[in-house]
Image: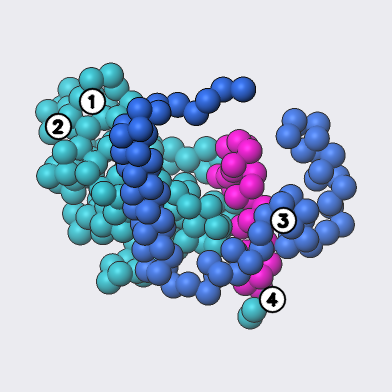
Amino acid sequence: MPNLESIACRLVEAKVEFVLCGGLAAFLQGSSILTTDVDVVCDMGSENIRRLFDAVKDLHTYHRMTPGRIPFTLEQLTTQPFQDIYLATDWGQLDCFGNVKGIGGYSECLKLSEPIEMAGFTMMTLSLEGILIAKRAMGRPRDLQAVFELEAARERKTNLH
Amino acid sequence: MTITEFEDFLDATKHMTAVQRAEAYGIDISLIDENLRLTPTQKIRQNDIALNQAEALQAALHQTRAKSGIHRLPTR
């Protein structure tokens, strides 16, 4: 049963160092395009990935881009460095990236982020400007639609204030 | 839309405001206005509700097809 809110909450509770990016961040910043996954850029160091593991370990989590649905295990932390991690959980998909196209890694994304409070927790989310940079860099048709939507949302917000 | 068509679109709409350009692209601005009225909590919950409804619809469709023996739409 999809529950992206709970996935995000788990990451915060486990103290994972991450910045929300992708479709959910765009949706929170004003896009109307619904999303089916939680995309985050995070510090890919072993300590942070250990926290990530703790956050989702009881959700039957597996690497969804691998044949055979290989479970996400703690042992993998010591055997392989991660660039990106594409996970499926009982609550939905969670993609963890080492880099966001057009911006860079976690530290660079953090500089272009802002805290968003929701459902009793606070998480860092790419700012509207940050998402626009990333979406323009991605350049797929759906990204360009999001760019037009977010530019319109920015204009609407400006006119409201 | 090809890259050329997209570039033509950008050129043809360069004098427009962002809202006008989005409308010209076919985006329903009322959906953006609706989104901007919601709090972050309301937004993520609305997204989750929509995902669950879509999943329930897919399951129902699957069940109906299984009962009727229809597994794919007829081709023309």
Q: Residue at x 48, y 52 (%)?
A: A34
Q: Look at chain A in the picture and name its colour.
A: cyan
What residue would you read off at disc 1? A69
Distance between mark 3 and mark 4 Cα atoms: 16 Å
Dot 3 crowding, Cα within 10 Å, few <14, some 14–19, many 20+: many
Question: Which chain is mark 4 on?
Answer: A
Q: Amino acid at mark 1?
A: Arg
Q: Helix, strand or loop at disc 3?
A: helix
Question: Which chain is mark 2 on?
Answer: A
What residue would you read off at disc 2? A73
**Which quarter of the picture shows residue A123?**
bottom left
What residue would you read off at disc 4? A159
Whether labels 4 and 2 belong to a single chain: the reply is yes
What residue would you read off at disc 3? B22
Residue A107 appears in the figure? no
Extreme residue toward the bottom, this view: A161
Q: Which residues are magenta?
A: A133-158
Chain depicted in blue? B
Q: Nearer the viewer, residue B6 or A16?
A: B6
